[in-house]
Amino acid sequence: MYSIFRRLSLYIQGRSPSPGLREYFYYIDHQGQLFLDDVKIKNFITCFKDKEFLAFFFKRLKLNTNAEKYAADFPYVSPCGREQNYVRCDDRPIVFTHHVDPRDESEHEHGYLSYGGAGNKLTVPFEPSKIYALPGSGRLYHPSVERVGGVGLIKSSLAIELSRSFEFCDGPEETSAPTHFNWKGSRFALDNSLGSFM
């Protein structure tokens, strides 16, 4: 967990460390909502909701590889022109919020998962066999964009909906991981390949 005293002494929101550059600090919660990090009350009222801004922000989000620039506390950065936007998160920076059906037969047959609060502006192809249930946590994950680590969290409301289609062939649901996922008439064996990223 982050100490509030450490965070407050670590940065100044909107600081200009050099001419023409400003630094801002953000937080992404486990529902995928984006906030300024120092907002005291984080809820739907105080999160960013403009889809154009969110798409712009998340398309530029990547790992913060500069160890001298807040990387220990803000492991991601979204450079936007003359702004450096440093980001920390509750779990993963990409949180899938809903499933989008394909519009026609030329698109990915299983549809897409949307993220970043930007509706259909930010999506990845849905891969049913790649859903990963983290043992003991109840959280579900799915492949994401590589520039932020390749794994995204599935928002709890969507996870509950998807988990209704799990099968548990290795034992009771309470003590074993799902082995299969049923999606629109097809049965997929879960490959659990994301387990190596956890």
Image: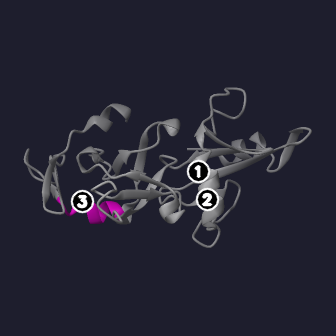
Q: Earlier in the sequence, mark 3 or mark 1?
A: 1
Residue assigned mark 1? 58
Left or right of 18 on screen, residue 134: left
Q: Say how many tags the image has.
A: 3
Residue assigned mark 2? 54
Left or right of 134 on screen, residue 78: right
User: Which amino acid does the dot numbered 3 rest on?
Assistant: Ser
Of 52 and 135, nearer the camera is 52
Neighbours of disc 2 within 10 Å: few (<14), some (14-19), many (20+): many
Residue at mark 3 to residue at mark 1: CA–CA distance: 27 Å
Measured from the top left, where is residue 16 in percent x and y? 87, 43
Residue at the extreme bottom: 45
Quadrant containing the N terminus in the rendered view:
top right
Left or right of 104 on screen, residue 37: right
Q: Main secondary structure of the magenta part?
A: helix
Specify the segment rendered in magenta: 158-165
Residue assigned mark 3? 163
Asked whether 126 falls inside the magenta stretch, the response is no
Q: Are marks 1 and 2 in contact (CB under 8 Å)?
A: yes
Nearer the observer, disc 3 or disc 1?
Answer: 1
Q: Which structural element holds mark 2? A: helix
**Image point 32% across, 60% down: which residue?**
159
The label on residue 9 is none
